[in-house]
Amino acid sequence: MKRLNLTVEGQTEQAFATSVLGPHLERFGVFVGKPRLTGLHARRKGRIPTGGLLNTFRHSLGDIRRWMREDRSDDVRFSVMVDLYSLPRDFPGYDEAMSLSDPHDQAARLGESLSKELQDPRFIPYVQVHEFEALVLADVSCLAGWFEDADKRIQDLASECSAFATPEHINHGRDSHPKARIKRYFSDYDENVDGPALVGQVGVSAIRQRCPHFSEWLTKLEQLDA
């Protein structure tokens, strides 16, 4: 069995890794330990709050390196789950990646740059296109059992999102990124509570059909113990 040490952007991804990703990967002989928040060391020192990455990635990069030094076992692998939306500009290879037009290409190039920066074959990069809520939008019908009188709002949200090839192509403008679109129709949406639960309802199979970049990452994780 392989172990996966996962660094995540926030509490939403932390809950997802524990309640959805971990149980799924266990079927493939991969154990997901307790995910660590990005910039954990700096958070403990009070240098950054408990939210996302803010405007720097250097704290996160330092923590990933520290974890790799702490755990040098042959059976462990490392990965990250951070959003392309509002990604700090000091992320390795940021300017080069963001000059590309397709978000999947952007995320792939960022992953390559991060791997090159870390120089550790145990590392599997992942940048979520464009943010966690794209996984919720893989099947907006999941909102029906979660919010009251939701049918019309779901229909309008689905119509809005149908303009994009996949949920991962929904853009990252300040008022048009995936979470903003959900909150436009469901103002009481709580990303930390509702997000992981709704993704669990959608299910891994449906998500990977609609979110190809996520599916590629998941396939790599499933094959760690092959």
Image (cartoon, helix red, strand yellow):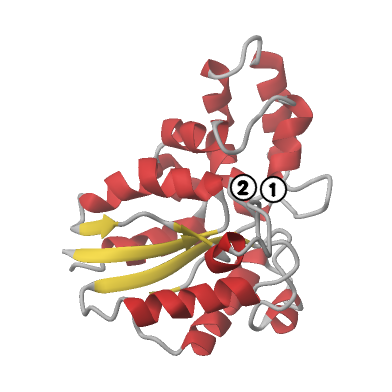
Relative to 75, 22 lies left or right: right
Q: Residues within 10 Å of mark 2 (few under 14, many from 20)?
A: many
> What SS does tag 1 mark?
loop
Quadrant, the N terminus = bottom left
Q: Identify the residue position indicated by label 2 in the image.
A: 167
Q: Is residue 89 visible?
A: yes
Q: Position of residue 50 (x, y in %)?
A: 63, 52
Q: Quadrant of residue 76?
A: bottom left
Q: Amino acid at mark 2?
A: Pro
Q: Identify the residue position indicated by label 1 in the image.
A: 164
CB-based contact (under 8 Å), mark 1 and mark 2: yes
Q: Position of residue 62 (x, y in %)?
A: 54, 78
Q: Position of residue 129 (x, y in %)?
A: 61, 58
8 vs 115, nearest the viewer: 8
Cα gap from disc 1 to disc 2, whole angstroms: 7 Å
Residue at 47% x, 32% y is: 197
